[in-house]
Amino acid sequence: MQRIVQAVNSCQKMVKAAILIEHSHGRDRTKIEKIFSRFGWITPSLSVQEKGLENVTVAEVLMAKGGENTGSWLWCLSDDIVNDAVKNMARNNIGSLVVLKPGHAQHVAGIITERDYLRKIILEGRSPMHTRVGEIMTDESKLITVKSSTNILEAMQIMTDKQIRHVPVIDGRLVGMISIKDVVRAVVQQQSGELKRLNEFIRGDYY
């Protein structure tokens, strides 16, 4: 996952530099610096910290996903049967479920993921029909979460450092769930928009 972060940062630098070189036709460095300055960017030879991405939050990623963010498809109860939880994940094409405590609709008890199922059910030869979610979930004391106001790059770094692929979004209550796929998609879309605007400016579509 660390390679994903590095690849995104490297791609940002190389593509922008390539576009400028391709279209510059002898423009001097001052002109190129002005182009980057107009979009709030730093020239490629320097360390690039995208101001656009700094303003993208987890809340925006959840909105982009569309649909209901906190429906019953997103969670299960700690006393549910593992088999039912896994069926829920398969039915909704997701890789994890937030686990709630019975009788406490917004009290997060932990998270259950495909990895938990593989390691603690399949590899240990346990029956998913006779095992409760609470027995194999990652407990709330070890649960990594983010807030809806968390910056997308910060969320990506957290997931990379902790080597996790799913993070519940909690603002005092469960707001939603984001995956590393959601984060990477948001970063790519943001960069595509910025590169398009840069291309348009260089070609003269801006004045």
Image: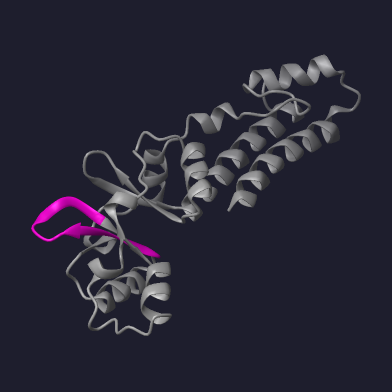
- In-image side of 148 versus 191 (left or right): left
Q: Residue 73: where, in percent of width, then height?
A: 27, 63
- Quadrant housing residue 93: bottom left
Q: In the rendered image of this protein, does residue 189 appear above or below residue 101?
A: above
Comparing 62 with 47, the one in front is 47
Comparing 17 with 137, the one in front is 137
Does the magenta segment cover residue 30?
no
Q: Residue 18: where, in percent of width, then height?
A: 80, 37
- Quadrant housing residue 109: bottom left
In percent of the image, x 78 and y 21: which residue is there?
Answer: 32
Comparing 56 with 154, the one in front is 154
Q: In the rendered image of this protein, does residue 91 appear above or below residue 1?
A: below
In percent of the image, x 37 and y 46: which residue is there?
Answer: 62
Question: The C terminus is located in which quarter?
Answer: top right
Q: Which residues are magenta?
A: 95-109
Q: Residue pushed farthest right? A: 26
Q: Residue 135: where, in percent of width, then height?
A: 26, 69
Confirm whether residue 37 shows in the render.
yes
